[in-house]
Amino acid sequence: MSTVKEGKKKAMEPAVISWREKKDVADKEEEALVKDIEDLRSWTEMIDAMNDEQLKEYLKNRPEELKTVKIQKSKPRQKVQRFKKAKSSASMGIMASVLKFHKEDSEDSVRPDV
């Protein structure tokens, strides 16, 4: 079991990466983004060049990963009326303070002095 704990500790520690390795990773990500942008541009140009019949045919035969998933609407739920709380005004806070002190005064008068 001690080996498992040691393994977890090693996994939790951040790996030290040199600036050159960071730059290489950033360059690879940049290349991937440039490729994705070029693919998107070529796809949009292809779609723009199509007429209506070609677009209909494309939509019927497009790749599976480009198909969108239709989300079905759920049945409408019955609306339930909820009771709203009365809005507290500034006077409610003042009244609460007055009642608190009044209650304390009445408790003092009920207790006999010791």
Image (cartoon, rainbow, N blue to C red):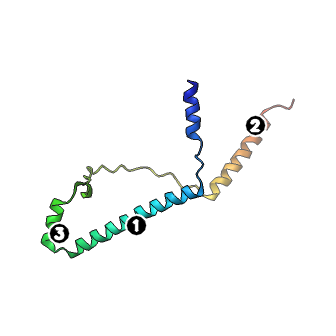
Alpha-carbon neighbours of circle 3 within 10 Å: few (<14), some, or many (≥20)? some
Q: Nearer the viewer, residue 34 or 62?
A: 34
Residue under label 1, please give it.
Answer: 34
Alpha carbons under labels 2 and 1: distance apart? 79 Å
Residue under label 2, please give it.
Answer: 107
Lower sequence index among marks 2 and 1: 1
- Tell me: residue 69, above or below residue 8: below
- Which three-letter amino acid code belongs to the residue tagged 2? Glu
Which is in the foreground here, disc 3 or disc 2?
Answer: 3
Q: Is residue 102 left or right of residue 42?
A: right
- Which three-letter amino acid code belongs to the residue tagged 1? Val
- Which three-letter amino acid code belongs to the residue tagged 3? Leu
Q: Secondary structure at mark 2?
A: helix
Which is in the foreground here, disc 1 or disc 3?
Answer: 1
Q: Is residue 81 left or right of residue 107?
A: left
From the top left corner, tell me how far across and down residue 20 is, in percent. Answer: 57, 58
Which residue: 24% across, 57% down? 67
